[in-house]
Amino acid sequence: MVNPKLRDNLTDQLCKAMLTLKDTEECYQFFEDICTVSELKALAQRLEVARMLRVGHTYEEVVERTGASTATISRVKRCLNYGADGYDTVLNRLK
């Protein structure tokens, strides 16, 4: 179940907008316009952290590969264990 604090008309609009994207190129175009480079890199980093944790990599390995802070790694791990299963959904579909 998604945190009800996240749900509102603007967030619904964002989610619906993302669902209209047809391919990787359109995703790049959208993210380039909507995010700063740092924001996009942070999102990509978190997804890789989740992927690595899910397959059993240690914090040290994750830090070395991604450059993520231990705080970021801990937050992602908490989401993997107690979150809304969003990472699991995406990572399963990427296989």
Image (tube, grey):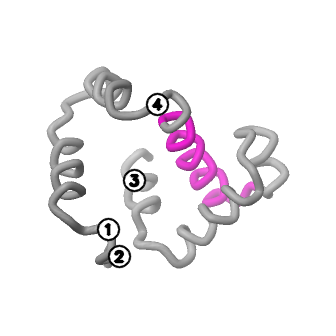
Q: Amino acid at mark 3?
A: Val
Count of numbered labels shown in the rendering? 4
Residue where numbered disc 4 is placed: 36
> Which residue is located at x 72 percent, y 60 percent?
71
Q: Nearer the viewer, mark 2 or mark 3?
A: 2
Which one is earlier in the sequence, the residue at label 1 or at label 3?
1
Which one is earlier in the sequence, the residue at label 4 or at label 1?
1
Q: CA distance from mark 2 to mark 4?
A: 25 Å
Residue where numbered disc 1 is placed: 6
Q: CA distance from mark 2 to mark 1?
A: 6 Å
Q: Is residue 55 magenta?
A: yes
Q: Amino acid at mark 2?
A: Asn
Q: Residues within 10 Å of mark 1 (few under 14, many from 20)?
A: few
Left or right of 42, for residue 67:
right
Residue where numbered disc 2 is placed: 3
Q: CA distance from mark 1 to mark 3?
A: 19 Å
Left or right of 63, for residue 29:
left
Q: CA distance from mark 2 to mark 3?
A: 18 Å
Q: Residues within 10 Å of mark 3 (few under 14, many from 20)?
A: few
Left or right of 68, for residue 35:
left
Residue where numbered disc 3 is placed: 90
Res 70 quadrant in image: bottom right
Q: Amino acid at mark 4?
A: Thr
Q: Are marks 2 and 3 in contact (CB under 8 Å)?
A: no
Q: Nearer the viewer, mark 3 or mark 4?
A: 4
Q: Secondary structure at mark 4?
A: loop
Q: Is residue 43 above or below residue 5?
A: above
Q: Are marks 1 and 3 in contact (CB under 8 Å)?
A: no
Tell me the chief SS of the magenta region. Answer: helix
Q: Position of residue 81 (x, y in %)?
A: 57, 75
Specify the farthest residue to the right.
Answer: 60
